[in-house]
Image (cartoon, rainbow, N blue to C red):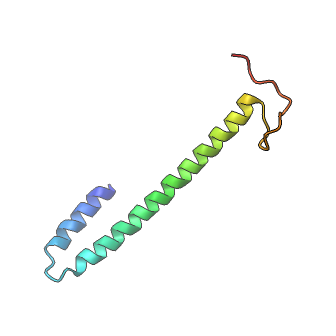
Amino acid sequence: MLGTAQGVAGIAASVDPTGLASMATASAGLAARNAWTASANARMDAQLERDLQENYRRYGMNPDGTPSGKRPPAK
């Protein structure tokens, strides 16, 4: 959806003889990219935290590296 909107805006900006429309589309595209990047970073950080907690549980450790006293599940 975002790509379609950018394509339509780019076509409209390409026929503008002054070039001012391209500056507006460039800043809007940059804002959209920054929002997408922030969202992707948040998802990645959440997944890393889930993976870290799973490793602590799997190997019977506390976050500070000490044993939790729970035995790891048998394989």
- Near-viewer residue (25 or 57): 57
The image quarter containing residue 32 is bottom left
Residue at figure coordinates x 81%, y 24% from the top left: 71
Q: Quadrant of the N terminus?
A: bottom left
* 51 horizontally vs 71: left or right: left
Answer above or below: position of 20 versus 11: below
In which image quadrant can residue 53 be found? top right
Q: Is residue 29 above or below residue 56?
A: below
The image position of residue 14, as x and y in percent, is 16, 71
**Outermost residue toward the right?**
69
- Answer with left or right where residue 49 lies relative to residue 70: left
Q: Quadrant of residue 64?
A: top right
Count of labels in the image: 0
Residue 28 appears at what percent x and percent y? 35, 70
The front one of 36 and 68 is 68
Q: Residue furthest bottom?
A: 18
Query: Which residue is painted at 33% across and 58% down in the image?
Result: 2
Q: Position of residue 62 (x, y in %)?
A: 79, 39
Among all residues in the image, which is located at the extreme front? 65
Report whether 74 appears left or right of 7. Answer: right
Q: Residue at x 20, y 73 (%)?
A: 13
Residue visible at 39% across and 62% down? Answer: 33
Look at the image and tell me in which quarter the C terminus lies. top right
Image position of 65 with respect to 44: above or below: above
